[in-house]
């Protein structure tokens, strides 16, 4: 790495003047900081953007999944089907309830739950399916097939759309709208971020009411200590909402830039043996990270690091991690654990940096 070359991280959030202006204006209001009008405005923007009837924001994207599970009736001893390829927050969110995540392999092209394997995993104890839209992609079999499976079996469909803000299904619905509840994350790597944060969308009035009560001690509204149901404290803050409002204004431009970043990678890596980007239909999908299969992945990552380029290995199969250590064989998830790599994907990545990354990959595989 040349002393004049700046290190390119795999990801870095982007906060700037718009966020600062929102925060400073709010501080001048002498507000209470806990969620109120700014949070309500942020929820409205997400609901309008996704087309959902309701949006409820919470303190992080793991809690959002947990609340979604509670809202559809998941409890101790129930089973919830989750992909073996996902961020560990997906199964952990139901493990926290005393429910049992059941791991199922994923489709090799989309890394989304395999439909046949999902059907085979359903038992009388199955209460929900958590469908993770990996990197904004839709299921290869079509989302309607999972909706039909949920109706047929009476199992609730929850969409873990943490990586999918800005991605839609072929029928025009935003990802997250097909399930009973859809969940998004606003952690640092996501296309918009509030540092931490999560959102739940639903078109079901009763589920929305249940979610709002669950996140706020079980009460119907703030400022009262009368509780008709059990709830918890997973509220948002006005400071996060200020950042979120500024980030939402930037979202259309970020979506277009994410797609352009993928296009430039696809052009720069075309014809290089040993590396294969996962495909995206950019008319529907906004890639969160640039994901690929790479031969000699660890050696490639070391080579790129020596050139001042950061990468991140993709999720290893969860059933093999020490946290779970379960028997089973999920060939696709296991293969991704060996070959999956995320290349630099931050929104502020420049065209020149992408060219430099592709040239470094070319030099590794072609000399």
Image (spheres, helix red, strand yellow):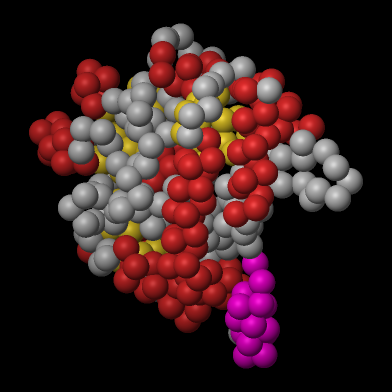
Position of 318 compared to 55: left or right?
right
Q: Is residue 329 above or below residue 151?
A: above
Q: Residue at x 33, y 59 (%)?
A: 201
Residue occupying the point 66% across, 72% down: 16
Q: Residue at x 18, y 53 (%)?
A: 171
Image quadrant occupied by the C terminus: top right
**Magenta-span inclusion, residue 239:** no
Relative to 111, 88 lies left or right: right
Q: Magenta part of the protein: which range?
A: 15-29
Between 199 and 192, the residue placed more toward the observer is 192
Q: On screen, 110 above or below 323? A: below
Circle count: 0
The reply to whether residue 110 is visible in this rendering is yes
Q: Position of residue 356 (x, y in %)?
A: 67, 44
Residue situated in front as seen by the camera: 203 or 230? 203
Majority SS type along the magenta span: helix
Residue farthest to the right, as pictured = 3
* Front-lying residue, 222 or 278: 278
> Picture coordinates of residue 334 (x, y %)?
48, 16
Determine which quarter of the picture holds residue 123.
top left
- In the image, what residue occupies the spot 51% across and 48% down? 264
Residue that lies at the very extreme toward the bottom in this rendered image: 29
Q: What is the quadrant of residue 70 in the picture? A: top left
Q: Is residue 329 above or below residue 265?
A: above
Residue 67 visible in rendering: no
Residue 332 position, x and y percent, is 41, 19
* Figure quadrant of the N terminus: top right
Estimate the x, y position of residue 227 in percent, counting from the top left: 39, 64
Q: Is residue 89 above or below residue 299?
A: below
Q: Describe residue 367's horizontal placement relative to residue 341 as left or right.
A: right
């Amino acid at each position: 790495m040349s002393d004049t070359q700046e290190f390119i991280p795999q990801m870095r959030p982007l906060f700037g003047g718009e966020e600062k202006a929102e925060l400073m204006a709010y501080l001048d209001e002498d507000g209470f900081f806990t969620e109120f009008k700014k949070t309500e405005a942020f929820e409205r923007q997400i609901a309008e953007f996704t087309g959902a009837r309701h949006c409820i924001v919470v303190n992080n994207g793991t809690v959002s999944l947990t609340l979604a599970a509670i809202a559809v009736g998941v409890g101790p001893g129930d089973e919830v089907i989750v992909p073996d390829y996902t961020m560990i927050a997906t199964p952990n969110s139901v493990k926290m309830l005393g429910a049992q995540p059941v791991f199922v392999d994923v489709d090799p092209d989309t890394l989304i739950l395999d439909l046949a394997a999902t059907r085979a995993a359903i038992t009388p104890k199955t209460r929900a399916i958590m469908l993770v839209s990996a990197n904004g992609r839709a299921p290869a079999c079509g989302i309607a097939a999972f909706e039909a499976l949920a109706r047929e079996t009476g199992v609730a469909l929850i969409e873990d759309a943490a990586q999918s803000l800005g991605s839609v299904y072929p029928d025009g619905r935003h990802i997250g709208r097909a399930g009973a509840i859809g969940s998004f994350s606003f952690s640092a790597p996501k296309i918009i971020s509030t540092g931490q944060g999560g959102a739940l969308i639903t078109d079901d009035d009763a589920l929305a009411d249940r979610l709002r009560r669950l996140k706020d001690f079980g009460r119907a509204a703030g400022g009262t200590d009368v509780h008709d149901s059990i709830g918890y404290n997973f509220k948002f803050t006005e400071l996060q909402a200020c950042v979120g409002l500024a980030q939402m204004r930037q979202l259309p431009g970020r979506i277009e830039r994410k797609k352009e970043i993928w296009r430039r990678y696809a052009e720069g890596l075309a014809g290089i043996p040993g590396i294969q980007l996962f495909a995206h239909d950019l008319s529907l999908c906004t890639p969160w990270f640039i994901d690929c299969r790479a031969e000699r992945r660890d050696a490639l990552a070391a080579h790129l690091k020596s050139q001042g380029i950061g990468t991140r290995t993709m999720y290893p199969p969860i059933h093999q991690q020490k946290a779970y250590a379960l028997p089973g064989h999920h060939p696709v998830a296991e293969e991704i654990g060996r070959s999956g790599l995320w290349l630099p994907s931050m929104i502020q990545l420049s065209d020149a940096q992408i060219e430099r990354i592709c040239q470094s990959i070319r030099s590794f595989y072609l000399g």
